[in-house]
Image (spheres, rainbow, N blue to C red):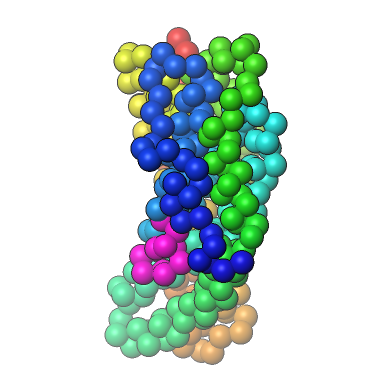
Amino acid sequence: MTTESLPRTPAELGLPELPVEARPADPAVHHVRAKLDREIRALLAYEPGTRSGADPEDLHQMRVALRRMRSVLKLSGALVGDGAEPVRAELGWLGQSLGEVRDHDVLIGHLREVIADFEVRDQAPGRRLVSLFVTERAGAKRRLIRALSSARYSTLLREVSLLTRDRSVAATEEQHDLVAGLAKPHRKLAKAVRALPADPPDDDLHALRIHGKKLRYAAELAQTSAKKKRAKRIKKLIKATRDFQTVLGDHQDAVIAAERMRTVLETADGEVGFVAGRIAERELARRAEARATWRTSWAAVDDAAQALHA
């Protein structure tokens, strides 16, 4: 399939001209459909920039839209029909391709900032170090373009658009409370926090960040269905989860960067190896800073969630 035959606009997917809107009094299923409608439009809007690569933020926002759709379908997919789970799995497939490029963008951007502060004599080997990851990114970008140009991607877009319009929902499902539904992802996050030792493994903190992200996306969906007072409380929860994600995101980025520097040290020449070693030390310090503050961020999330259900 060529890119010319791919759906490029909401109209080509059969979506209405204007985004679907949901009022607080509308049933939960309408809020879910409206959310999917908004995110599939965002996916389409950021796709050209993702393909061109002119601004890495386009790829980031496309990935965010995809993750929000996956989260909605995980939490409330039953409201939009039996096709929700297969679509969620396919969004995961696309997410892998987007994530591979995004991870390189984050790493490359960070390395360039760090190296810019080094002495002049370390600038050239620093640029050679970055070029290693730029080459890797080019391969990941080619794989992403193939995915975005495939019939599989076209089918995925059409299946998501169908979920925004499916009306085969049982009457009992219409009474689903999205705000009350926030208790479940909060409980999962709290349980994961309680299970951690004093000095958690890096992978466990990464998993914690994912739990926090799911709570945030669920809160974003629930906010549209909440009345004014509860909507304000949900807004505080969204901010707290965003801050929580930032702290643990910095931790994960530092872990990945340090590990990549260790890999470079195994094969690099003296000058590049020296720069890689300096960066690894910085990343381990950044990791330690995040570990010293993440529990404070978690306390803010927990307080906001408990206030919501009080």
The spot of residue 235 in percent (x, y) is 35, 27
Screen quadrant of the N terminus: bottom right
Magenta range is 46-56
User: Is residue 246 within the magenta segment?
Assistant: no
Screen quadrant of the C terminus: top left
User: Is residue 55 within the magenta segment?
Assistant: yes
Which sits in the foreground, 296 or 163? 163
Q: Quadrant of residue 49?
A: bottom left
- Note whether residue 22 is visible: yes
The spot of residue 290 in percent (x, y) is 45, 48
> In the picture shown, does residue 57 fall above or below 126?
above
The spot of residue 220 in percent (x, y) is 43, 31
Q: Quadrant of residue 34?
A: top left
State left or right for residue 16 relative to residue 95.
left
> In the picture shown, does residue 179 fall above or below 74?
above
Q: Identify the residue shown where x is 49% and y is 61%.
A: 102
